[in-house]
């Protein structure tokens, strides 16, 4: 998913697509200053927040997937760590203060050039509410999770994995790949969680 870059971000000259020496991929290269414009995956960071055996979910007030439920998460900013980004996104989307933040899962989504880094965390208090990107924020028991109203397949997979880990009591770092085909599973309630 490369976006055309018509002008150099360094000098403003036109770019052209070539395979630079020592590279294997077609890149946008400045015709004047030879700056190579690399396009890399976006990192999304967020939190799976637990409180009294419940999970905090946000109902999206923005596209994509307006009105669907998700974990508080968003694009990592420059000059922040992934955990700082997860804490910031949680505050922005759920006005929630969290503690005990630990990396839980890393999922690659190559068909849309994204990487999700989700942290487990605990709510500090019950003072949470919808931020500007959320319609509502709510704690869900396992049996009340709105499986058919989840926004993204990566969130579905994270929740399924978490609930299975919770049963076993073993929370190892989870990794995996989310494929485009997994989107069709968003309409189904998972079994055995």
Image (spheres, rainbow, N blue to C red):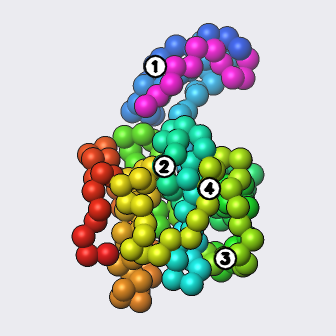
| Residue labelled with disc 1 | 18
Q: Secondary structure at mark 1?
A: strand
Pick the front one: 5 or 57: 57
Q: Earlier in the sequence, mark 1 or mark 3?
A: 1
- Binning the other alpha carbons within 10 Å of mark 3 as few (below 14), some (14 to 19) or many (20 upward) gives some
- Give the Cα distance between marks 3 and 4: 16 Å
- Binning the other alpha carbons within 10 Å of mark 4 as few (below 14), some (14 to 19) or many (20 upward) gives some
- Image coordinates for residue 83, horizontal then vertical, percent: 65, 65
- Image coordinates for residue 176, horizontal then vertical, percent: 36, 61
The dot on residue 123 is 3
| Residue labelled with disc 2 | 68
Which residues are the magenta region? Answer: 1-11
- Give the Cα distance between marks 1 and 2: 41 Å
- Give the Cα distance between marks 1 and 3: 50 Å
- Give the Cα distance between marks 2 and 3: 22 Å
State whether residue 174 appears in this view: no
Q: Earlier in the sequence, mark 2 or mark 3?
A: 2
- Give the Cα distance between marks 4 and 2: 10 Å
The dot on residue 136 is 4
- Image coordinates for residue 171, horizontal then vertical, percent: 44, 82
| Residue found 71% across the figure and 47% down from its top | 132
């Amino acid at each position: 998913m490369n976006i055309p870059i018509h002008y150099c971000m360094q000098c403003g000259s036109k770019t052209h697509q070539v395979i630079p020496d020592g590279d294997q991929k077609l890149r946008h290269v400045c015709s004047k200053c030879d700056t190579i414009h690399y396009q890399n995956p976006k990192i999304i960071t967020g939190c799976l927040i637990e409180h009294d055996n419940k999970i905090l979910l946000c109902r999206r007030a923005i596209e994509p997937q307006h009105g669907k439920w998700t974990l508080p998460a968003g694009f990592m900013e420059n000059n922040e760590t992934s955990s700082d980004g997860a804490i910031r996104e949680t505050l922005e989307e759920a006005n929630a203060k969290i503690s005990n933040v630990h990396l839980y899962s890393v999922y690659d989504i190559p068909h849309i050039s994204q990487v999700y880094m989700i942290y487990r965390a605990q709510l500090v208090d019950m003072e949470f509410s919808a931020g500007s990107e959320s319609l509502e924020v709510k704690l869900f028991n396992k049996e009340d999770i709105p499986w058919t109203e989840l926004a993204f397949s990566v969130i579905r997979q994270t929740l399924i994995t978490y609930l299975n880990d919770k049963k076993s009591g073993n929370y190892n770092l989870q990794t995996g790949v989310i494929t485009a085909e997994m989107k069709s599973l968003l309409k189904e309630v998972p079994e055995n969680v």
